[in-house]
Amino acid sequence: MKIGVVGKGGTGKTTTSALLARAYAHRGAHVVAVDTDSNPNLGMSLGVDEATAAQAPLVPRELVIGSGDDDTPQRLLADYGIATPAGVTLLHAVRVEEAGGGCMCGSHASVRSLLGSTVDEHVGVTIVDMEAGLEHLSRSGGTLAYVDVLLIVTEPTHKAALTAARTVDLARELGILRIALVANKADPNDTGLLDDTTAELGTPLAGMIPADPEVMTADRTGGPLPVTTVAGRAIDDVVAFIESAEEERTALLAEKARVDAKLAALGDA
């Protein structure tokens, strides 16, 4: 399962990615979290200290898995993955270290290559915490073209809804089939706006994450997300949505295989 987490700046993509990663790790999955923000902070949310996170090795820009060299997902994780206290393996794909250093296109191409490889053979769940904006969907090939589920983190505001609408359009053009919204810092009073947004976009709401004082405290101090929080419990709804979507996909693929086999048998006859 490969999950992309995107959204407008400040909506809570990194927090959502960290909560998801922890939730899957708690369920016993082998989880890899990929931080593609040019100012990476996902590691701290997963319990990595600031100094270690700052010195983490970057996934090579020139990486193209499956090109016939010795680079494999397994070796990549061994060479560049960081074990976190949350039980999640962290990869840093992008980091701006000097002014005028050029675009990050090569780094994003590496992430796309990773997602398009046989990473599923070595990892149960891969979660990609994307940088803010839409560029990762507009780049040639699309960084997230190979994700199974795209989660658009949005706040219950009109501006965030506009960004979500633009993201949905680009994601569909890229061929991503399963797209859902995650409402962050929301409460029951926002249900009307969220219902209108999901209806207009034709995109389901995977879950609502309420504003959580403990998460805000962790963000202020730069510390890890607490083990048990209101937000952490709410993320279970998002996990349930993703798992339900995967079960539906598996059933559809099985039915397709059954029909294809039947048609092939009729053709042979």
Image: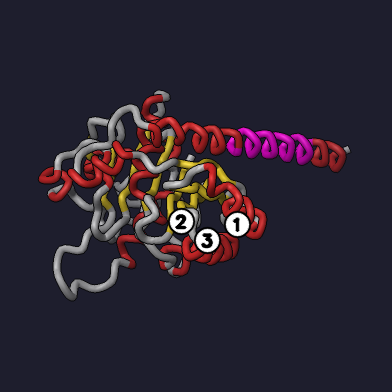
Judging depth in this view, the residue of 165 and 127 nearest the camera is 165
Distance of label 1 from label 2 (alpha carbons): 23 Å
Does the residue at mark 1 contact the one at mark 3 (Cβ under 8 Å)? yes
Nearer-N-terminus badge (2/3)? 2
- Quarter of the figure with residue 98: bottom left
Residue 197 marker: 1
Q: Is residue 229 left or right of residue 222?
A: right
Judging depth in this view, the residue of 60 and 36 nearest the camera is 36
Q: Which numbered disc, 1 or 2, marks the residue closer to the eye?
A: 1
Distance of label 1 from label 3 (alpha carbons): 7 Å
- Circle 2 sits on which residue? 144
Q: In this view, does 160 lie to the left or right of 268?
A: left
Whether 246 is among the magenta residues is yes
Q: In this view, does 193 lie to the left or right of 183?
A: right
- In the rendering, at what x and y percent does residue 87 appear? 29, 29
- Quarter of the figure with residue 89: top left
Check disc 2 and give the amino acid type: Leu
Q: Is mark 1 on a helix, strand or loop?
A: helix
- In the rendering, at what x and y percent does residue 243 appear? 55, 33
Distance of label 2 from label 3 (alpha carbons): 21 Å
Q: Which numbered disc, 2 or 3, marks the residue closer to the eye?
A: 3
Which residues lie in the magenta part?
A: 245-261
- Circle 3 sits on which residue? 161
